[in-house]
Image (spheres, helix red, strand yellow):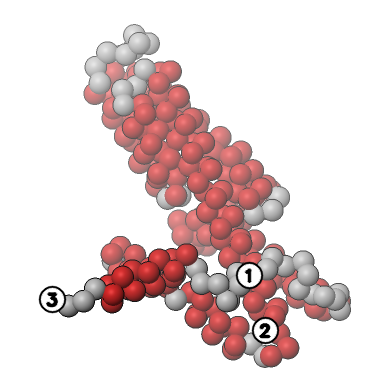
């Protein structure tokens, strides 16, 4: 399933311009410019969300590595790397990182705090829980909210609502979904009150005349394959 998702994602990205142009053409002619801007704004939101997730993963990974180093847990750098990568998986990522940290602390033998293995594992578990709480209540609302131009309180409420309605998937998509709804409702409001031009405040989408980098690379690859003479 993961391989199929990767292959489908590759071809969706490769043909995104055609898909975007088809969606724009499906709109009535007077609204095609608005449709192009709305799609461009949605793309900007998703890119900002991805940047926020990368920043969040970097911050959590560094914090986890430093904390484990201070406590004297072995493989602290590896634990920090795992924490940063698994940050993209809500709840389960932090849980897996905490379990790995506790297991390493439990079986590494001696520790600089002079505690028993079980006591040291409890200290590491408490530190992991503390980092997770700071992440969920401080870092996520501020970093993701700032990336998507949302108030941290809105992000927290969106996470609570989406988590109770859709579980892990809801937690992952809550912030970009709220930002996209904000964009859509803002557009509807501007059109309703007759603000002109209604499209001025929306981010401009990528130019249809310029293909994406992935499509240019794919075109070069195909051109290189066709230029070779058969043996």
SS under mark 1: loop
Q: Position of residue 70 (x, y in %)?
A: 43, 18
Residue 132 is at least partly visible in this image: no
| Residue 77 drawn at (x, y percent) | 37, 29
Which residue position holds label 3?
A: 231
Q: Residues within 10 Å of mark 2 (few under 14, many from 20)?
A: some
Quadrant in the picture for residue 23: bottom right
Q: Residue at x 31, y 22 (%)?
A: 74
Residue corresponding to mark 1: 205
**Res. 86 in view:** yes
Within-10-Å neighbours for mark 1: few <14, some 14–19, many 20+: some
Could you tell me if the residues under marks 1 and 2 are in contact, i.e. CB atoms within 8 Å? no
At a point 68% along the width and 68% down the height, the residue shown is: 204
Query: Secondary structure beneath disc 2?
Result: helix
For this orientation, the residue located farthest to the left is 231
Secondary structure at numbered mark 3? loop
Indicate left or right for 86 with 229 as reference: right
Q: CA distance from mark 2 to mark 3?
A: 50 Å
Tell me residue 68's x, y (percent): 40, 24
Of callouts 1 and 2, the N-terminal one? 2
The total number of labels drawn is: 3
The answer to which of marks 2 and 3 sits earlier in the sequence is 2
| Residue 188 versus residue 128 in the image, above or below | below
**Relative image position of residue 106 (x, y in whole percent):** 28, 24
Front residue (pair 166, 198)? 198
Residue lying farthest to the bottom in this orientation: 28
Disc number placed over residue 32 in the picture, else none: 2
User: How far separated are the C-alphas under marks 1 and 3?
Assistant: 45 Å
Q: Nearer the viewer, mark 2 or mark 3?
A: 3
């Amino acid at each position: 399933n993961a391989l199929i998702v990767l292959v489908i994602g590759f071809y969706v990205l490769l043909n995104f311009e055609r898909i975007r142009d088809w969606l724009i053409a499906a709109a009535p002619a007077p609204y095609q410019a608005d449709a192009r801007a709305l799609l461009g704004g949605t793309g900007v939101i998703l890119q900002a969300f991805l940047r926020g997730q990368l920043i969040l993963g970097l911050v959590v990974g560094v914090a986890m590595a430093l904390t484990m180093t201070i406590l004297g847990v072995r493989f602290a750098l590896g634990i920090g790397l795992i924490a940063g990568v698994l940050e993209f998986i809500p709840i389960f990522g932090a849980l897996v990182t905490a379990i790995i940290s506790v297991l390493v602390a439990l079986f590494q033998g001696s520790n600089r705090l002079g505690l028993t293995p079980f006591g040291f594992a409890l200290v590491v578990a408490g530190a992991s829980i503390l980092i997770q709480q700071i992440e969920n209540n401080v870092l996520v609302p501020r970093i993701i909210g700032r990336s998507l131009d949302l108030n941290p309180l809105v992000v927290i409420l969106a996470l609570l609502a989406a988590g109770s309605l859709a579980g892990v998937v809801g937690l992952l998509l809550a912030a970009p979904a709220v930002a996209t709804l904000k964009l859509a409702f803002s557009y509807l409001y501007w059109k309703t009150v007759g603000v002109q031009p209604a499209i001025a405040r929306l981010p401009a989408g990528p130019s249809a005349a310029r293909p994406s980098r992935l499509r240019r690379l794919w075109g070069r690859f195909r051109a290189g394959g066709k230029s070779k003479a058969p043996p």
